[in-house]
Image (tube, rainbow, N blue to C red):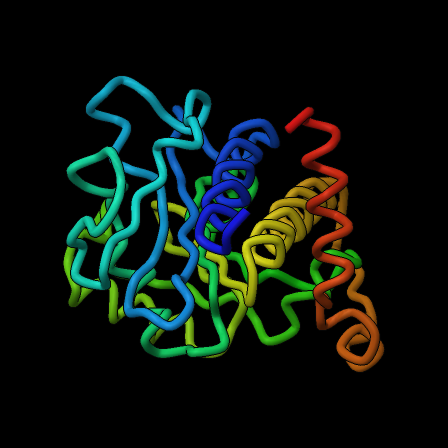
Amino acid sequence: MDNLNYLKEKLYQACRLLSIEGMTNTGRGHLAVRVPGKDAMILPGHLHDLGRGLDHIVREDMVMIDFDGNVLEGHHDESMGEFYMYAAVFRKRPEINACLHAHPFYASVMMATKSELLPVSRDACLFMDGVPYYERFPLYIGTREHGEATAECLGNCKALFHRGHGVLVVGKSIEEAFVTMTFLDNACRIQVSAAAMGPLVLLDKDEARKYYSELDDDKAAEIFGYLRTRAGL
């Protein structure tokens, strides 16, 4: 399998897992991966006008677009929306090769109170650099200006809360971006649930940063492979 087809296959699997793992709603959300050596990315085609979402996505739904949104290859006339924030992140951070946007429930609960993600669980320790809030409220990042503002707000962090909307997560690979999303989802779930029981007790930040602040390629591939196998993909 050539590299582009390999990326399309992995992206299809990750999009299906977003739905299977319950990290989005009404089939919305998407991932994008940078095309090596080009100002281009691969992501799903626009499915919602066809009455479909991530629940029913197929391999052939993947399209290649340039950073201005022009379709270079694929069976759809346009990609899933919000590519502007992906393009802005890819321009700003050359080490990032994959971006993910979703609407996980517990992250949405945290955003409703603008709560800070705290090191109260092992998963939360991946985000010791913080998860910033993008405060502007377009329900849809549909302009280059909003995309660039989102990337600027993200900075060098691994994830961003777009209050009232959803989450943006980035990684060096599809596997890393997806697994980072699962860590974020679980960290938010634990924090929201624990806060209902009493005062939160924080882990030692220095120790957390020393041992748990990175997700290496092997661990990301291992976890992604487990989730993919469990889902039968």
Horizontal and vertical percent for residue 210?
81, 80
In the image: residue 204, left or right of residue 166: right
Q: Nearer the viewer, residue 11 or 55?
A: 11
- Residue most toward the top? 51
Image-quadrant location for residue 153: bottom left
Quadrant for residue 207, please give it: bottom right
* Residue at (80, 60) in percent of width and height: 201
One can see residue 6 in this view: yes
Along the viewing direction, whichever of 198 and 231 lies nearer the viewer: 231
Q: Is residue 156 left or right of residue 206?
A: left
Q: Quadrant of the C terminus?
A: top right
The answer to whether residue 137 of the structure is visible from this angle is no
Q: Position of residue 82 (x, y in %)?
A: 26, 50
The residue at the point 83 percent across, 74 percent down is 211
Query: Would residue 155 appear left or right of 77 to someone viewing this image?
Result: right
Report x, y in % for residue 158: 54, 67
Q: How many marks?
A: 0
Q: Is residue 228 above or below residue 122?
A: above
Residue 80's quadrant in the figure? top left
